[in-house]
Image: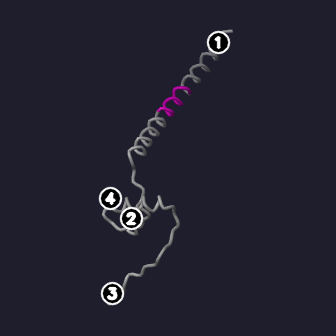
Amino acid sequence: MKTAVKTERITILGTPDFKNFLTREAKKEGVSLSQLVRQRCEKKPANNDDEELLAALVEEVHAATVKASLSLKKGLDDAEKVLAKIKKAT
């Protein structure tokens, strides 16, 4: 035997403008206001274009930082070798 889905009433407070906004959004999506709130609250945030762009930029900055760090280390190593040669020559 199947059991009935249980629901509970949830009351939230908002301004009339907020309620009108929710009502318009629900109408646009063709769902009830309650269904709209459930869908929006249960939905995992999607990766939007800004987040994808930011992730790509972070990868580029990371790669550039690694490259710069290696170049700096090589430059410091080269400078130490030159200083060692100068000290030997004097």
**25, 53: nearer the viewer:** 25
Of marks 1 and 4, which one's residue comes earlier in the chain? 4
Distance of label 1 from label 4 (alpha carbons): 77 Å
Q: In the rendered structure, are the residues bearing label 4 and label 3 in contact, judged by CB atoms less than 8 Å apart?
A: no
x and y percentages locating residue 53 in the rendered image? 41, 41
Q: Quadrant of residue 76?
A: top right
x and y percentages locating residue 49 in the rendered image? 38, 44
Q: Which mark is residue 36?
A: 2
Colour scheme shown: one colour
x and y percentages locating residue 81 in the rendered image? 60, 19
x and y percentages locating residue 26 in the rendered image? 36, 62
Q: In the rendered structure, are the residues bearing label 3 and label 2 in contact, judged by CB atoms less than 8 Å apart?
A: no
Q: Residues within 10 Å of mark 4 (few under 14, many from 20)?
A: few
The residue identified by callout 4 is 28
Q: Residues within 10 Å of mark 3 (few under 14, many from 20)?
A: few
Dot 4 falls on a residue whose secondary structure is helix
In front: mark 4 or mark 3?
4
Residue farthest toward the front in the current orientation of the protein: 16
Q: Quadrant of residue 36?
A: bottom left
Distance of label 1 from label 2 (alpha carbons): 75 Å
Q: Is residue 28 positioned above or below 83 on the image?
A: below
The residue identified by callout 1 is 86
Q: Is residue 31 positioned above or below 82 on the image?
A: below
Dot 1 falls on a residue whose secondary structure is helix
Q: Which mark is residue 2?
A: 3
| Range of magenta residues | 64-72
Residue type for callout 2: Leu
